[in-house]
Image: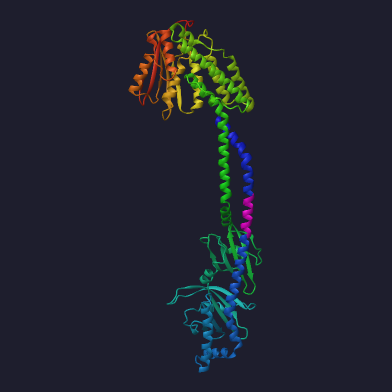
């Protein structure tokens, strides 16, 4: 029942506290996501613009050499003479040496330029910024010449990706070669840009998130590709083939089944398209990083809801546990000596419980004192132990409490079961002296008592009976077994670890009814067992009223032959037994 009410309160507090917290979390998630997406759009577009400006600067610096060629006829003429006759005069070499110095300084002074080639149509030689005059027949890098025939007529520029073969000084180099037709001379100028150098210098421009960068030519073929997302796991070629030149900044695109944020910038001068794709999982990851503290707050709220539900549940059910503990102590002869045991009246239920507790404690305490005073006289002891009060008010009060709980909850609960069983136990224990009982009545009362104890200590022990059905109608003493069961639970099973067992065995032998209560609790060592036996034999209190009371009642009713017999072994358990003569009538058996 406690668990049921705990879950109910947990649900209520969750609705009150957590729903606003979740709404706030969703708002923060939306704001953080929107902010991150806007930041990514701005950062990506700025990166593309910077890359475009850098590329324009590289190309302008490279093709500045064309102006030198076209505006200086002497240089062009000297270059043609050397290409044609393989020889030249001193003036030609001076001009050519000046040209090589200019080209070489342009290439070396700019980290993005590997080399610059000048080529005049119809000649088998070209001019290199690195080597000067080179022959197409034996120079190590001539793959650029194969692309000369592919130069379109309607545009002055053409770009292609190729590899410069390895030489003794360096390995193979991936370059982006830019072809430009000369304006007033039949020829071309080729600027070779190392792709790795270009990307390394652009690394700081790219957004810090995982992304994919591409440079596409006029046909949307990939010239340059770069990623910091750990490799290319998506096929982009087919998507780029159908991608329009004009793309909205920060648009979304599905590529090969994966979602990306896309930014693209078209360079009309060179027919290039710069594309920057950011996978959606990278965006989500950055948004999640922004939500660390809101998530911690949500977890803290969950813990708070759990603590509030647990605290209120324990507070509401502490009254029932308080009543059971007081009744249990009262049965052992332990009574409160001051008003500290009185619960504060916070509701009508507290008022009812306080009245029940006060009535029960006063009655039990008075009965205990009366029994103690009259027990010294053997004739009066039996009567004192039988004194009871009329239980109607207490039972009616418990029934009122039972009805109030049922009305509050709307259906029977564990608290109703506890109160009903407690009411039955009170009826049984406070029954008039002249009402006889049978073994079946005593066992039924034990079952209710055990059930209440199981509410207190769930999943700790089990009680089972070894009693033949034909013995159920035999007359028996009222409240003889309950103190023995209680002793086994309190002193045997509760201090022990693990699951406990209590066995009630009743059988007939040699005209006597033998009763045994056996448990597998912690048991007692030999010294403690001998002290307990001696105290019972000498009528000395053992620290509680249970065993002494039962032992005295058995001796007074049946003689010393029926006194309690206790066997125990430390770590194995305890067995308490007695035997009484079998009588055919029950008119003299009620205590």
Left or right of 69, for residue 475: left
Q: Quadrant of the N terminus?
A: top right
Whole-percent x, y for residue 336 in the image? 51, 22
Q: Main secondary structure of the magenta part?
A: helix
- Residue 170 placement: quadrant: bottom left
Q: Is residue 373 magenta?
A: no
Is residue 386 positioned above or below 27 on the image? Answer: above
Whole-percent x, y for residue 512 in the image? 40, 9
Of 516 and 20, nearer the camera is: 20
Is residue 455 positioned above or below 179 on the image? Answer: above
Q: Which residue is pictured at 51% across the width and 70% down the height?
A: 196
Q: Which residue is pictured at 49% across the width and 5% down the height?
A: 587
Q: Residue furthest left?
A: 526
Of 193 and 102, nearer the camera is: 102
- Residue 396 placement: quadrant: top right
- The answer to whether any part of residue 460 appears in the image is yes
- The answer to whether any part of residue 83 appears in the image is no
Q: Is residue 36 magenta?
A: yes
Give the residues drawn in magenta, as a range.
Answer: 27-38
Whole-percent x, y for residue 554 in the image? 42, 11
Is residue 489 positioned above or below 266 on the image? Answer: above
Whole-percent x, y for residue 399 in the image? 60, 19
Of 149 and 95, nearer the camera is: 95
- Residue 424 placement: quadrant: top right
């Amino acid at each position: 029942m406690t668990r049921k009410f705990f879950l109910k309160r947990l649900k209520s507090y969750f609705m009150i506290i957590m729903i606003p917290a979740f709404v706030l979390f969703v708002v923060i998630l939306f704001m953080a996501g929107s902010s991150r997406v806007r930041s990514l759009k701005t950062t990506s577009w700025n990166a593309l613009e910077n890359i475009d400006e850098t590329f324009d600067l590289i190309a302008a610096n490279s093709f500045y050499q064309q102006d030198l060629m076209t505006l200086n006829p002497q240089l062009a003429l000297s270059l043609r003479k050397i290409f044609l006759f393989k020889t030249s005069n001193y003036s030609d070499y001076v001009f050519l040496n000046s040209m090589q110095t200019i080209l070489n300084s342009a290439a070396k002074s700019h980290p993005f330029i590997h080399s610059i080639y000048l080529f005049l149509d119809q000649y088998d030689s070209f001019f290199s910024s690195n080597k000067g005059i080179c022959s197409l027949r034996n120079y190590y890098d001539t793959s650029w010449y194969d692309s000369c025939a592919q130069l379109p007529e309607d545009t002055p520029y053409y770009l292609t990706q190729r590899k410069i073969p390895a030489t003794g000084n360096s390995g193979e180099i991936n370059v982006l070669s830019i072809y430009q037709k000369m304006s007033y001379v039949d020829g071309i100028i080729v600027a070779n840009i190392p792709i790795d150098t270009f990307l390394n210098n652009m690394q700081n421009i790219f957004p810090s998130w995982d992304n994919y960068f591409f440079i596409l030519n006029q046909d949307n073929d990939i010239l340059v590709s770069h990623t910091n997302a750990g490799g290319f796991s998506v096929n982009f070629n087919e998507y780029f083939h159908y991608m329009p030149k004009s793309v909205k900044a920060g648009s979304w695109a599905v590529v090969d089944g994966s979602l990306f944020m896309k930014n693209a910038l078209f360079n009309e001068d060179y027919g290039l398209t710069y594309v920057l794709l950011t996978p959606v999982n990278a965006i989500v990851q950055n948004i999640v990083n922004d939500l660390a503290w809101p998530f911690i707050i949500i977890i803290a709220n969950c813990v708070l809801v759990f603590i509030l539900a647990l605290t209120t549940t324990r507070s509401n059910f502490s009254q029932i546990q308080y009543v059971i503990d007081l009744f249990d102590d009262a049965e052992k002869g332990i009574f409160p000596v001051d008003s500290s045991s009185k619960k504060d009246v916070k509701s009508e239920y507290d008022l009812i419980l306080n009245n029940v507790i006060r009535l029960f404690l006063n009655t039990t305490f008075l009965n205990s004192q009366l029994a103690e005073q009259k027990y010294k006289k053997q004739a009066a002891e039996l009567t004192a132990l039988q004194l009871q009060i009329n239980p109607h008010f207490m039972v009616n009060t418990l029934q009122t409490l039972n009805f109030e709980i049922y009305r509050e909850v709307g259906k029977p609960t564990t608290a109703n079961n506890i109160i009903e069983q407690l009411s039955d136990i009170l009826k049984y224990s406070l029954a008039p002296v002249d009402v006889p009982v049978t073994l079946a009545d005593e066992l039924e009362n034990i079952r209710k008592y055990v059930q209440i104890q199981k509410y207190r200590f769930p999943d700790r022990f089990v009680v089972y009976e070894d009693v033949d059905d034909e013995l159920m109608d035999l007359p028996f003493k009222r409240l003889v077994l309950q103190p023995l069961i209680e002793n086994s639970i309190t002193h045997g099973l509760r201090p022990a670890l693990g699951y406990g067992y209590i066995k009630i065995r009743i059988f007939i032998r040699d005209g006597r009814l033998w009763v045994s209560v056996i448990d597998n609790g912690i048991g007692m060592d030999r010294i403690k067992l001998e002290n307990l036996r001696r105290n019972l034999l000498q009528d000395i209190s053992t620290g509680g009223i249970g065993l002494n009371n039962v032992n005295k009642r058995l001796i007074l009713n049946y003689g010393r032959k029926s006194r309690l017999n206790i066997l125990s072994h430390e770590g194995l358990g305890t067995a308490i037994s007695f035997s009484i003569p079998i009588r055919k009538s029950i008119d003299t058996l009620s205590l």
